[in-house]
Amino acid sequence: MKKLFLSLLISCAPFYLQAQEITGFSPEAAKEQIALEKQFDALLAPANLDAWMKKMTEQPHWVGTPFGEENAKWMKKQFESWGYDARIETYQVLFPYPKVRLLELTEPEPFTASLTAVPVEGDPYTAQGDALLPSYNAFSTDGDVEAELVFVNYGIPSDYEELEKLGIDVKGKIVIAKYYGSWRGIKPKLAAEKGAIGCLIYSDPKDDGYYQGAVYPEGAFKNATGVQRGSVMDMPLYPGDVLTPGYAATKDAKRLERENAPTITKIPVLPISYADAEPLLKALKGPVAPADWRGALPITYRIGPGPAKVRLKLEFEWKLQPAHNVIATLKGSEYPDQWILRGNHHDAWVHGAADPVSGMVALMEEARAAGALARKGQRPKRTLVYCAWDAEEPGLIGSTEWVEDHMGELQQKAVAYINTDGNGRGFLGAGGSHSLQTMVSEVAMAVPDPQTGVPIQQRLQARHRAYGGDGEFELYALGSGSDYTPFIQHAGIASLNLGFGGENAGGEYHTIYDTYSHFKRFKDPDMSYGIALAKTAGRITLRLANAEWLPLDFVPWQKTVSGYLDEIVETTTSMRKTTEKHNELVRSKAYELAADPKKNLTAPGMKSAVPYLDFSPLQNALATLEGEAESFSKKDFSTLPKSKREALNELLMKTEQQLTSPEGLPRRSWYKHQIYAPGFYTGYGVKTLPGVREAIEQRDWEEAQSEIEKLAGTLESMAKHLKAINALN
């Protein structure tokens, strides 16, 4: 019995230790907060998530649809019934709807792509006919082009480097690229820069079709006719309404002419299924594709160009559509002008059960429980603002327009923004501002995994260790791809992105198969991970709302940023060595002698030498920051008088803004944050210390040194800010 007790004590140790201390709370306040969270958990009901998902996914609801507006009005009523002041804020945004979609193989044998996904037995949502949004890429330009076809693998920069070695030029051609490898919008962007006149994107079965598992309806993966919709807007330049860059798309806003909107693609682009892609790829001749380019279709993958020739014709209806954001506010009892923002989008490409409704219903259940606690007299100290965004799918439009519309007020009042999107069975995924890492880690040790009963952090760490990682809990850095982008990267508001997954793989993403039926079979059948998400995001929201001093920790932040700098220094050193070796091989004609004489390979040319950049301004700034971060971590703010604690929180609210620059990043001034940004050629994928890193990657050494100086100034400002915080105690 004694051994059993000790075993139970050890297994529960993380929960026991968590109960003793919470960042931002005195011991007594921590006990009250933990008791509140237990009450919060008891209020959460999986049946609500199930019923709400079924209701919200009955019909397609992309931006501008009547059902999308109906969902927004219904959510507003729900929030009001839970005690929130709720409103709908509507913006008028440009949204293209496909009128003409034609794809033909004209040589060597004719073939016309069907461009239609088939309904499946047992899923009535897939049989809604014309109500389903046709498969297309939003913000492709109109066009009617015909040319030889070239296979470009994933259509990323390294693939074009390989094509250059093979002597293959895509100028004047239409390219066909696989989904994955990068965000879809990079594929037509890069193709256009290389001179292509059209772009096709297909889903290869190796990535999310029969190679991965049984296809829908037997299994979760993409069947032969499934097509991934999605935006190809050039979001690394700026997200949001393409006609109102940097300001809100209100009814009377001044708008760019469409032909002057820089985030619309330069060439027409269309997504297709692997059933439609196979005849096109089969008709290609030319070199056999490298081994790592080949997919799982029963063909020999060749690059071309030709003899396959295709015609691509696209026409869109370009209209302003209403985007309805639902904003629900629960006023704080002590600090009503300090806002904790919690958001998830509600629009979908078709039905959107997994993306985004699985996250939206978890948010709603959090809000309902928080409202119930408030009605019992346990109102949060800071104001909660729950947001249901519209028009996320075509380019983070609803959230971006709202942030641009409320920029000044947000920078004065926002404490943090917590985002969710899709959700499913598996492991916690958490990214965001690294000053929030300690707080998120504490929460992740307080929430049990639905399947194993251990803390969600413990299960995540076990997975990392099992696959060769060190098991440390770390937030990943935020690039783009969801509604946190305008908050952190434009407004400088500390942000998080949360969700569960890893055991819910499938091929339904942005297809007609992302339905309630599919979700209930393969994603989170009993909604237990929806409840886990509500517990996790709900705790973070409530801790931020009730903390005596905001639960920020700058030691993990400083260590993380120092790690980013180490990566850049190592990258530069590696580039120098690689360049020296490359140039020696060019001089000695090694590439030419090693090449197969029967293949039309192009020998590479010399590369410019990599200079020794001066990183000392950054290294010195980070050394100063290390001292200030360590000093902050040792402070006992529980002894501060109320007036000083209020001054402390006012300063802490503004820390993320210290990491922004008014002029933004080179050639994309909308992105103000100097630590995190989506990559110019990665899209969703993050580039940390982006100004410096991307200048080095582009081999622009003058700009790299300039960006080092600029970033050092940003970090020095952060150090001064932390010094002022430390001076309060």
Image: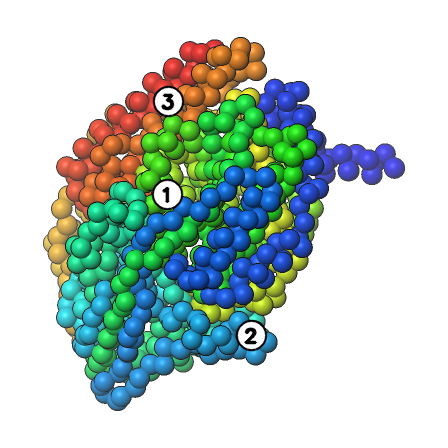
Q: Residue at x 24, y 75 (%)?
A: 312
The residue indicated by pointer 3 is: 625
Separation of marks 2 and 3 at Cα, in angstroms: 58 Å
Question: Amino acid under label 1?
Answer: Trp
Separation of marks 3 and 1 at Cα, in angstroms: 33 Å
Quadrant placement of the N terminus: top right
* Left or right of residue 373: residue 346: left
Question: Amino acid under label 3?
Answer: Leu
Residue 127, given in percent of the width and then of the height, sits at 50, 76
The residue indicated by pointer 2 is: 124
Q: Is residue 298 above or below residue 574?
A: below
Question: Amino acid under label 2?
Answer: Pro
- Asked which secondary structure carries label 1, the reply is helix
For the residues carrying marks 2 and 3, which lies nearer the camera in this image? 2
Q: Residue at x 60, y 42 (%)?
A: 82
Q: Nearer the viewer, residue 194 or 410?
A: 410
* Left or right of residue 7: residue 175: left
The residue indicated by pointer 1 is: 402
* Left or right of residue 456: residue 251: left
